[in-house]
Image: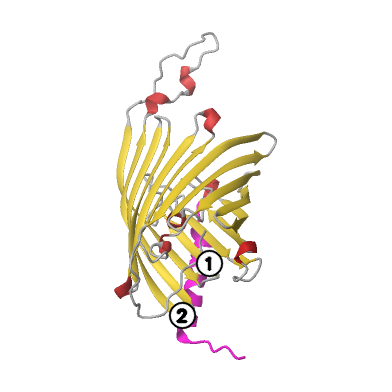
Amino acid sequence: MVFEVTKKHLFIYRFFAFIFTYIICTTDCFAQYADFSQIYNNYVYLNPAFVGTTSCPHAFTSFRTKYLSQGGYNSAYISYDMEMQKSNSSIGFSFLQDFQEKIFRTSDLLAIYAHTFQIQKYLYLRASLAAGYSHRVTNYDGLVFSDMLNVFQENYTATGEDLERYSKHDFNSEMGVLVYNERFFAGMTIKNLQGNVTEMNKNENLFPRIFSFHGLAKFSWTRAYTQQYLIQFYPHINMVFGGTSSYAQMGLILQKWMVQMGSAFRQNFPCNANSLSFFVGIVEKRFRFAYNCDMTINSVKRIDTHEVSLSYQFDCREKKKKFEAVKAPTF
């Protein structure tokens, strides 16, 4: 069998080669951003190119609390997406609020657009762009500064720092690319497109750019006609590059009937910190519910991160498309 390299294939190869080179040359190493353990339930946050992949309108909500016993960081996320079948494109929106008690708060509202291209008969490329509003708030009066500490007093003393509340409004954007068929997908996301690139070119109002590479495959234990014994396997991987937010997460989800169970291993970079995530979910035709907890496996073993999610797929009428499209495999 001879595979013919067309101009379309050459363009795709050059595109990904350019993106990879760009990442190596521009990735900065500082700051953090909100992240979720249920990366493939929360697939619109993982990659905006996922909007519309369920064909019918889809709503999703998730809440994650991290370091609960220490005051912790909390992240709430909502998304809605739908397909516009006549134009082979999809639209959606997402809202993220990330906060740490009354000290830090980040709010992002994004509008998302994605378009689908057919590469081969059952292989598709979906590209997306998201843009919207970002709001960052810091309350300095909730922080303790070094000049407030006195070894001869039990209480904090007055500080000489400026405790004025910091608030900034910004434009934010991200992009995503997804290649998929009905058995696998592979994608890439760049968050905070206009954020910091290098130390000499800082935009102090935004996080640095975050690059994510992810993939998932779908396998079955037996043939479909033996539904009683059918078990589906979803091995997946997600690699994120963004300074102190950099990590690699690898996991496996098993599904039998309406029940999903699985776990994932996460290695943070550059710090030598890692954790295990345990996942359980209930899948119905329209509703999905999932819960997971993360356990650190360093010197201090602690189950201190929890996440719950709920999604609903609305009913719709399937319309004839310009080409025989397939859905990207998600659980």
> Where residue 12 sits in the image (x, y, percent)?
48, 76
Image side of residue 241 versus residue 296, left or right: left
Task: Inspect this view and state whether residue 112 appears.
Answer: no
Is residue 245 shown in magenta?
Answer: no
Q: Which mark is residue 186?
A: 1
Residue 168 or residue 184, whichever sits in front? 184
Q: Residue at x 58, y 41 (%)?
A: 293
**Which quarter of the picture shows residue 286?**
bottom left
Determine whether label 1 and label 2 are within 8 Å by CB. no
Image side of residue 284 versus residue 302, left or right: left
Name the main secondary structure of what is drawn in magenta.
helix
> Where residue 180 sits in the image (x, y, percent)?
50, 71
**Which quarter of the picture shows residue 2?**
bottom right
Q: Which mark is residue 262?
A: none
Q: Secondary structure at mark 1?
A: strand
Give the magenta-colored segment's residue range: 1-28
Quarter that holds the N terminus: bottom right
Q: Residue at x 46, y 24 (%)?
A: 145
The residue where tag 2 is placed is 119
Residue type, label 1: Ala
> Where residue 187 sits in the image (x, y, percent)?
50, 65
In this view, the residue farthest toward the bottom is 2
Q: Residue at x 46, y 46 (%)?
A: 309
Residue 164, placed above or below residue 214: above
Q: Secondary structure at mark 2?
A: strand
- Count of numbered circles on the image: 2
